[in-house]
Amino acid sequence: MNISLDNQRPTTEAMRHAMVASQLRTNAVSDQRVLVAMNTLPREAFVPADVRDIAYRDTALPVAGGRAINLPMVTGRLLTEAYLERKDRVLLIGAAGGYTAAILAQIAAEVVAVEEDAALVALARGALGATPNVTLVDGPLAAGHPGGAPYDVLIVDGAIEHVPDALVHQVRAGGRVVAGLVERGVTRLASGRKTDGGFGLSPFMDSDCVVLPGFATPQGFRF
């Protein structure tokens, strides 16, 4: 009896469940709402066609313009550490193909997702469709979307050298911030809050994290 190799390949549903079991639950992604969303959403629908076969691998996925989409674990940890509430208005920086925005749409009240790469914006529009509580903004990542401020949560789904004041100003006092940070060539995941007295982030995990463009630390004047 001949057995088709295609029949031996795991289904995307099986790969999605395996991703949750082996990549998320084992790495302190403990928010059940995040786990349910990532166990439900077809991640392959939010990436370019040429990488759909590896959509559930424990690796960053290369996409348009030299960019990459974060490891599932990284996105899951950032969303877990954001301590999301149902009433939250979330500003997402680095929407890429719309995957993280789609997860957030199942948890928070409103999501404003910013992406500057034209090919990724087109991909996200197609993948998100008419998701009612997601607004996709085509514009510079570092600028955010001040027209929708203030936000309860700022999520940067990638690593940056610093959080620009332009983004900090868009978060309400008491609002939460999670992001990847690049420090001396090492990427870390970090979280913090904006208060009336200031803003700061504290790393909670060293991890591979895709680097977002446009967030280099400003250099001081040199004479």
Image (tube, rainbow, N blue to C red):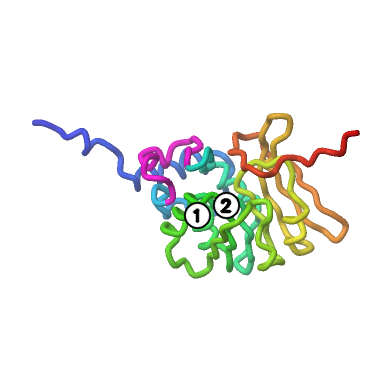
User: Quick check: 49 left or right of 182?
Assistant: left
The residue lying toward the viewer, choosing from 210 and 125, is: 125
User: Quick check: 2 left or right of 22?
Assistant: left
In this rendering, does residue 132 appear at all?
yes
At x 58%, y 50%, the residue is: 94
x, y percent for residue 221? 87, 38
Q: Which residues are drawn in magenta?
A: 46-63
The residue lying toward the viewer, choosing from 151 and 125, is: 125
Amino acid at circle 1:
Val
At x 75%, y 56%, the residue is: 166
Note whether 85 is above or below 30 in the view shown: below
Amino acid at circle 2:
Glu
Q: CA distance from mark 1 to mark 2?
A: 7 Å
User: Quick check: 173 left or right of 207?
Assistant: right
x, y percent for residue 213? 63, 42
Dot 1 or dot 2: first in sequence order is 2
User: Quick check: 193 left or right of 122?
Assistant: right
The answer to whether the residues at label 1 and label 2 have Cβ atoms under 8 Å apart is yes
Element marked by disc 1:
helix
At x 39%, y 40%, the residue is: 51
Residue 86 sits in quarter: bottom right
At x 39%, y 38%, the residue is: 54
Residue 220 sits in quarter: top right
Q: Which mark is residue 121?
A: 1
Element marked by disc 2:
loop
In this rendering, does residue 36 appear at all?
no
Quarter holding the C terminus?
A: top right
Name the residue at the left extreme: 1
x, y percent for residue 116? 57, 52
Note whether 75 is above or below 3 in the view shown: below
Disc 2 target residue? 116
